[in-house]
Amino acid sequence: MLSGFHPGLIILATVLATILVVLLFVVPSNKRNLKNVERKFAGAVSDFVSERTKSEEILNDLDVGVIAYGKGGVRINVNPAAKKMFQPASIPDKFDEFIDSYGQDNGVQAALLLGSEAINGKLLMGDKILRMRIKLSHFEEGQAMSRLVVLNDVTEQEREEQRRKEFVANVSHELKTPLTTIKTYSESLIDWGLEEKPVDAIRKDIWRIHDDSLRMERLVEDLLLLSSIDSKGIRVRMETLNFASLVRQVVDRLHHQAKDKQIELSCYTLSRIPAVYIDKTSMERVITNLLSNAIKYTERGGQVKVYISYLIDDVYVKVSDTGFGIDKEHLPRIFNRFYRVDMTGSRMFGGTGLGLSIAKELVDLHDGKINVASTLGKGTEFTVMIPIARKVFCDTLEAYQVGSPMQGFLYQTAAQALQQHATDMGFPENCLSDLTDSDQDKLLSRALICEEDEWSTGTQSRLPAN
Ligand code: ADP
């Protein structure tokens, strides 16, 4: 049938038909394939981008500083933690410059030259101490020279380590001094023979040995107490107590010590003092330390005054003396362990240099504050402030009502005490967050009854009560 057509026309028709078939069937199918490929490609890119974003988010959230140097030692990434650690300095763009600036004094550059794989060094940046690790990395395929600089802020650990070393050195020194005395005096007694030495001299030597053994005993006791506070192993029995009564008992106890030095010791209660929620033994220890220091560091014939009062939500006790005073340059370190203003002076009085640091730790345990004010040659005033029991219990209850119980030893103990009172009053277990206002009032009234209220029931002090 086609034989009647011109062959050229037949070829043209065949080409057109082929194009038509291609246009009708092949192109759409290829387009579909192309779309599939495009979709897959877009998916892969989006997966890649999201993975990369995730990695960057993780990198941004890290406390660890990370700087990445890639091909040719050029910086390719740095996370915010690293930027913060180096502030205000900027981080060099090239690895070599980085090492020139930060790897010379700490041996990092030398270790790199020796070809070590993992390199560590410390870096001082202002008041921060950083630990720097440099690693060869394969984050860029085939780039053997890619380097990761990983930085950790180890300031607190280093300071802690330094404090620990100083503490051990101080303890050894403090123990060595009385030990040497004990050894020397006992050796002299042995060498001389008791018969050849006058009785008075023997007695003196034995007293020296005795005094220094007491000093060692005090030191060991203080160290054990500090260690129990540090390890949170200290035994405390929190109770609602009359603060004025407790302070006055301590003042009474030290009355003789003051009298022996002809120091006038007086105690003033300035107002009716609300109850406190405290550990009696700890707080007695704090007041005893402040008062015995005031007596120790005041000349004969001086005065020591104790004021007890309260201010809004805190009770306070102020121990004020007319003694030697403390130079203001020493005041910031006065609560440090083993810190003594005058080494010989304090030793002469048999001090360990630990009393005030223990006092501070114990006051902290009660969420209180301890302050000092002093004028050299005129006298010193220590003030201890402790939150009143009502405030501690109210804060504890309020925190339970809003569903976020307060953390910390004081408030956890207060919560336990309140729950115990609530159980005794017939409320269910774990009821602190569900109490009505009137139930809370009842609970508070019960919790605020002092367990030992001898002053409010009329016991009198031997000292003037003003
Ligand atoms: P110490 O056992 O040596 O008394 P503390 O920790 O109680 O140790 O006191 C630390 C130092 O503070 C004392 O060595 C003393 O130099 C000084 N200090 C403490 N209280 C007073 C005070 N009331 N007046 C003058 N100096 C004081």
Image (cartoon, rainbow, N blue to C red):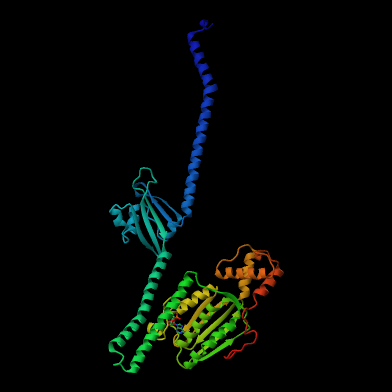
Residue 244 position within the rendered picture, expressed as x and y whole percent measured from the top left = 59, 83
Seen from the viewer's position, the closer of residues 206 and 301 is 206
Q: Is residue 308 above or below residue 435?
A: below
Can residue 336 be seen by looking at this rendering? no
* Ligand 1: quadrant of the figure: bottom left
Residue 97 position within the rendered picture, expressed as x and y whole percent measured from the top left = 33, 55
Q: Which image quarter is the N terminus in?
A: top right
The residue located at (43%, 80%) in the rendering is 218
Q: Is residue 272 left or right of residue 183?
A: right
Q: Is residue 333 above or below residue 262?
A: above
The residue located at (60%, 68%) in the rendering is 416
Q: Is residue 367 above or below residue 265?
A: above
Residue 347 position within the rendered picture, expressed as x and y whole percent measured from the top left = 39, 84
Q: Quadrant of residue 189?
A: bottom left
Seen from the viewer's position, the closer of residues 196 and 399 is 196
Seen from the viewer's position, the closer of residues 88 and 99 is 99
The residue located at (44%, 59%) in the rendering is 84
Q: Which image quarter is the C terminus in?
A: bottom right
Tag count in the figure? 0
Seen from the viewer's position, the closer of residues 179 and 7 is 179
Residue 438 position within the rendered picture, expressed as x and y whole percent measured from the top left = 71, 70
Can residue 376 be seen by looking at this rendering? yes
Q: Quadrant of residue 409?
A: bottom right
Please identify the residue farthest to the front as the structure is shown.
195
